Image (cartoon, rainbow, N blue to C red):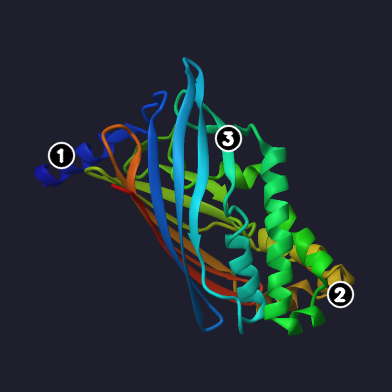
Amino acid sequence: MTSVVLLMALMAQAQTKIAPKLENGFKAVYTEKSTINMMGKELTYNSDNEYVVSDVTADGAVITVTNTAMDLPSMEGLDPVSAMLLMTAQINKGTTVKMAVNADGVPQKILNLDEVKEKAGETIEVLVTNMFDAVPELSQAISKDDMTKQLVEVLSEEMLLNDDVLALNGKTIANGSQDSFTNDEGMKMKRMYFIAGKKIISNATLDMSKDDLKELIIKKIEEEAPEQAQMIKENIDMVMGQLKFDATEKHTYEMQANGWPASITSEESKDSMGQSMKVSSVISLKK
């Protein structure tokens, strides 16, 4: 019993603050391999991103992230939803993002947001044209202009600041510590952290009340099918009984002595508005 109590006490005391070393000229290249499983199909894509540190001061620095390579499957024969996901993954293809970070490496602001949006806008126009050529039946569901608009709206400063490699920066993590966040589907999540040597593991689960879910359903319908919003509001309880909502996330970070991750492994599962999706990815430092 004494050993168990001592072990629990040691685990409770284990904590670490993530603050990567920021030095002018520091460079790291990370390769990402991701797999999306949705609607019975599997999509795999790879990309390389280069991180360069500059303009270091006592208050922070600039980290420039450049997508140097991206390898994606063909959109030929894909269903519209899968094709849309694949297009979203390509928005940052070939872009250079300059972000201001504080002294702990926490992203604060995108310094070249207009430039990034202009570059991404050009990419999106080409992607949409290619997609409608590859999936001609898509025009029955959405116009080119509407799809272009939806993809442009995805590229926000908030999305660009949400960088996986920098995700832990500034956090003081202890075994059992928790925080809350909202995922990209608008679902509220609760996350718990664990420390195991050089590894930091986070597990997240859905944390939404019935009223929260009602609000989410109505918001999504108003955004995606406004003509049906009133009908959904009047029958919201019945709609909720027919739809499954769930989400889980697990991330494992292998950290280096300099505070930069050596690798990040993640598994995400989502059930939302009748659509189920699983995403697994491995981000690793190139030697």
Tell which circle, 2 or 3, labels the residue nearer the N-terminal end: 3
Decide: is 156 above or below 91: above
Q: Looking at the rendered structure, which numbered label has been put on residue 6?
A: 1
At a point 38% along the width and 40% down the height, the residue shown is 28
Secondary structure of the residue carrying numbered label 2: helix
Q: Residue 214's quadrant in the figure?
A: bottom right
Spatial CA distance of label 3 from label 1 is: 46 Å
Tell me if mark 2 has few (under 14), some (14-19) or many (20+) residues whose alpha carbon lies within 10 angstroms of its own: few
Q: Looking at the rendered structure, which numbered label has been put on residue 231?
A: 2
Q: Is residue 5 left or right of residue 123?
A: left
Decide: is 13 above or below 30: above
Tell me if mark 1 has few (under 14), some (14-19) or many (20+) residues whose alpha carbon lies within 10 angstroms of its own: few
Q: Is 165 in front, or is 68?
A: 68
Spatial CA distance of label 2 from label 1 is: 58 Å
Spatial CA distance of label 2 from label 3 is: 44 Å
- Residue 138: percent from left, percent from top: 75, 80
Q: Is 162 in front, or is 79?
A: 79
Which residue type carries mark 3? Answer: Lys
Decide: is 78 above or below 223: below
Which residue type carries mark 1? Answer: Leu
- Residue 43: percent from left, percent from top: 50, 74
Q: From the viewer's perspective, is the residue at label 2 or at label 3 nearer? A: 3
At a point 23% along the width and 41% down the height, the residue shown is 11
> What residue is disc 3 on?
98
Q: From the viewer's perspective, is the residue at label 3 or at label 1 nearer? A: 3
Q: Looking at the rendered structure, which numbered label has been put on residue 97?
A: none
